[in-house]
Image (cartoon, grey):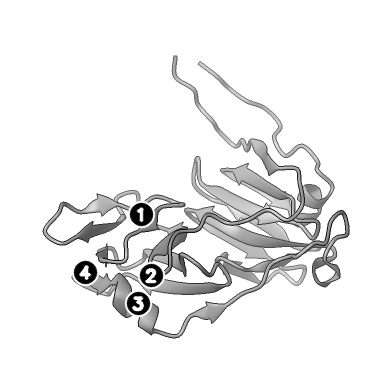
């Protein structure tokens, strides 16, 4: 039986408890927390030594001895050090050819620093009241502010309650964490408001299965 999702999102609670952790690896490794592609044939891959190239998936831990390849100019990957989810590196595809970088060389660069809710027991983190933080995403995601400005969503972005999110591709996903530490995953394509997620509203209208 083939299942078809059209104009549908499935709201999945990843965990109900506060203080959730991130997928982490060992020091010296990198964890994939974001993948963006404007094209269906775009991919990012890695290999160790003379081994074969392996396509990177969200949540993968890439070994310290690996090198990473981006070969589509409009694609990018976001990576956090295995022992530090508050730091993130971004690799963009080049205008032509391919970009290949060793994990060790990436870690020598200066990362962007981000922060996430740190609830204490049942007490929400006041810094993130009425906000959601992006902890992971796959595919094309856009955030639209109350003023109508839009931007591509990236790891660690803080989304205000007055904003909207657009997941463009089918089965593309975004993981969002609230001030209490609870995470929600939304599967696209779908347009929804940040407020809907904060209120735990149902985001889908219909589901076609064939």
Q: CA distance from mark 1 to mark 4?
A: 16 Å
Q: Along the line of sight, which residue is nearer the eye, 185 or 41?
A: 185
Q: In the rendered image, which quarter is residue 157 located in? A: bottom right
Looking at marks 1 and 2 on the same chain, the residue that comes earlier in the sequence is marked by 2
Crowd rating for badge 2 (residues with CA inside 10 Å; few <14, some 14–19, many 20+): some
Label 1 or label 3, whichever comes before in sequence order: 1
Q: Earlier in the sequence, mark 1 or mark 4?
A: 1
The mark found on residue 39 in the picture is: 1
Q: Kindly indicate the quadrant of the structure image that contains residue 110.
A: bottom left
Closer to the camera: disc 3 or disc 4?
3
The residue that mark 4 highlights is 98
| Residues at marks 1 and 4 touching, judged by CB atoms closer than 8 Å | no
> In 3D space, how far apart are the residues under numbered discs 1 and 3 (Cα atoms)?
25 Å
Which residue is located at x 69 percent, y 50 percent?
183
- Of mark 2 and mark 3, the one earlier in the sequence is 2
Give residue 91's quadrant in the image: bottom left
For the residue carrying disc 1, how many other residues have a C-alpha within 10 Å: few (<14), some (14-19), or many (20+)?
few
Mark on residue 124? none
Q: Locate residue 7 relative to residue 197 in the image: left or right.
A: left
At mark 1, the secondary structure is loop
Q: Which mark is residue 28?
A: 2
Q: Residue at x 45, y 66 (%)?
A: 78
Q: Mark 4 or mark 2, which is nearer the start of the sequence?
A: 2
Instruction: Give how far apart the Cα atoms at labels 1 and 2 are.
Output: 31 Å
| Mark 4: secondary structure | loop
Q: Do residues under tags 3 and 4 come within 8 Å of each other at their CB atoms?
A: no
Q: Residue at x 55, y 47 (%)?
A: 173
Earlier along the polypeptide chain: callout 3 or callout 4?
4
Q: Check disc 3: other Cα within 10 Å, few if <14, some if 14-19, many if 20+.
A: some
Q: Secondary structure at mark 3?
A: helix
| Spot occupied by residue 40 in the image (x, y as percentages of width and height) | 34, 49
Q: For mark 3, what is the residue? A: 106
């Amino acid at each position: 039986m083939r299942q078809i999702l059209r104009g549908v999102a499935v709201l999945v609670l990843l965990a109900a408890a506060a203080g959730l952790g991130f997928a982490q690896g060992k020091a010296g490794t990198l964890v994939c927390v974001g993948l963006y592609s404007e094209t269906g044939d775009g991919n990012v891959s890695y290999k160790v030594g003379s081994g074969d190239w392996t396509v990177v998936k969200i949540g993968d831990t890439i070994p310290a001895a690996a090198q990473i390849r981006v070969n589509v100019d409009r694609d990018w990957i976001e990576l956090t050090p295995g022992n530090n989810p508050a730091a993130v590196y971004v690799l963009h595809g080049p205008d032509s050819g391919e970009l290949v970088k060793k994990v060790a060389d990436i870690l020598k660069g200066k990362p962007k620093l981000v922060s996430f809710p740190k609830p204490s027991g049942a007490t929400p983190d006041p810094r993130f009241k009425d906000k959601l933080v992006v902890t992971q995403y796959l595919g094309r995601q856009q955030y639209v502010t109350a003023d109508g400005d839009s931007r591509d969503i990236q790891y660690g972005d803080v989304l205000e309650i007055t904003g909207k999110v657009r997941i463009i591709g089918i089965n593309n996903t975004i993981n969002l964490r609230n001030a209490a530490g609870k995470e929600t995953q939304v599967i696209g394509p779908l347009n929804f408001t940040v407020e809907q997620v904060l209120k735990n509203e149902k985001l889908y209208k219909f589901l076609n299965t064939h």
